[in-house]
Amino acid sequence: MTGFDFPGLLAFWGKRSDDILTLVGEHLLVVAIALLLATVIGVGVGLLVWNSPVGRSLAVTSAAVILTIPSLALLAAMIPLFGLGWVPTLIGLTLYSLLPIIRNTVVGLREVSPAIMESATGMGLAPGAVLLRIQLPMAWPVIVTGVRVAAQLTIGIAAIGAYVGGPGLGQMIFQGLSSLGSKNALNYALTGTLCVIILALIVDGLFTLITRYTTSKGLRA
Amino acid sequence: MTFEAVIERDVSVAPAELGVRRTRFWTLRRVVTPIVIVVVLLVLYLWIQTLTIDSIMARTLNADYILLRTREHLVLTFVASALVAVLAIPSGIIASRTRSRLLRGTILTIANIGQATPAIGFIILLAIIWQIGFQTALIALVAYSFLPVLRNTMVGLAQIDPNVTESARGMGMTPGQVLMRIELPLAVPVILAGLRTSLVFCVGVATVATFIDAGGLGDMIVNGLKLQRFPVLIAGAVIVSCIALLIDWLASIAEDLLRPKGV
């Protein structure tokens, strides 16, 4: 049982603000890279399979299976292949992000009204051009929502990545666990957890802006 | 199309659903999942048979140890999920009955913040503040899956067409009857989707419970890593993944069976 000592926590923050900021930065970086990779892969897969029932259900089902696997299991299973460090965390986070992104890409592309696609074809656009210049921009807000869900997911999972030597705030949480019983245990774990929550909320807010500024001008409400 | 609507749908719909629902009962995925699980476990077994097992590995790679850990894992998962179902669904019903917008808004906000909380941080914090062990893990699991189920119950009840409840009242049903015979059955798919998510989630968080000495299959993963015996690690990871897939599969069947016929 550790008593809660608020001035102690503030002093802890003051003393370790550099460490905390570094870890926050690392956390953001690993999530951002994973999301970027997952967006490229997920949207690519979505563009390939959106119109084929078999491909579609295959892609979405396999991504759903990955998401079902417990994160510690997936991250740990990659150690024999990739060793400890950033790589297993990065790959794990990318894999977990795929489901929301692929699913939303497929849903978004399919939701575009056939009448619009037909008029595009009528104006002389090739099928590929219809896909990239009409459907993709119209599906974009839905796709970004998928990335946003993936972001919330991966910010939390990244904390477990610290166990396989990954970067970020998880290190602080595990530091709390390993110093269990000492005065700073609570400070470490609490700081790590709080920072992850705040990060998740800020990133969620950022996505409102990202959606607005990456959506084609004509589609903005 | 408003963004809010898209977000709401995205969060509340279970991961496996995509457009087509309620086609055939025995779809390809239904049949394939258990076969894949059996094949994967078989391959794991055969692979381990080919390895030379040293004394350290023998301590964990035997049937007794694995069954014990699996049982711990399942007990943790199912007890937590049962508690959540018993606690969160009634709370969700009560919360959705109140007229107070403030209360409902507060609950949904807390639910959102709860979702942003990393499971590992929460469970370790609880262990530091209170104690390590099974009970702590159980409470962490319940507290953690409570909010999604509560929220899905509220969303499920809120999405019902008001015309339907109004006609039920017009037919002379009491508020209790409307709730039991109209609203709850209509909300069942969304509530079950929440429970299914929470079950799968519990399997995952129960893996992390090893860090606070609560047992479970996470022990195998962590031991394998600590002792540099990768087969132990792989076996633990594969078994726990198979359990997660199996539970998700069973939950998807329950979802189809329990959904009211007319919906």
Image: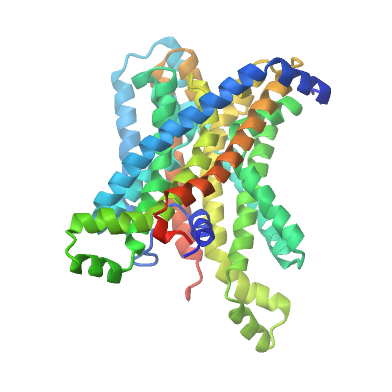
Q: Position of residue A31 (x, y in %)?
A: 47, 32
State whether residue A32 appears in this view. Answer: yes
The residue positioned 42% from the left and 40% from the top of the image is A97
Q: Nearer the viewer, residue B23 or A8?
A: A8
Q: Position of residue A136 (x, y in %)?
A: 32, 54
Q: Nearer the viewer, residue A146 or B227?
A: A146
Q: Nearer the viewer, residue B201 or B62?
A: B201
Would you place residue A215 above or below residue B156 in this image?
above
Q: Say left or right for B46 vs B15.
A: left
Would you place residue B13 above or below residue A194 in this image?
below
Q: Position of residue B108 (x, y in %)?
A: 66, 54
The residue positioned 62% from the left and 38% from the top of the image is B117
Q: Nearer the viewer, residue A45 or B217?
A: A45
Most extreme residue toward the top, as rendered? B55
The residue positioned 43% from the left and 39% from the top of the image is A96
Most extreme residue toward the bottom, as rendered? B171
**Colour mode?**
rainbow
Q: Position of residue A81 (x, y in %)?
A: 34, 21
Image quarter for residue B212?
A: top right
The residue positioned 69% from the left and 48% from the top of the image is B110
Image quarter for residue A54?
A: bottom left
State whether residue A5 appears in this view. Answer: no
Q: Say left or right for A151 vs B34.
A: right
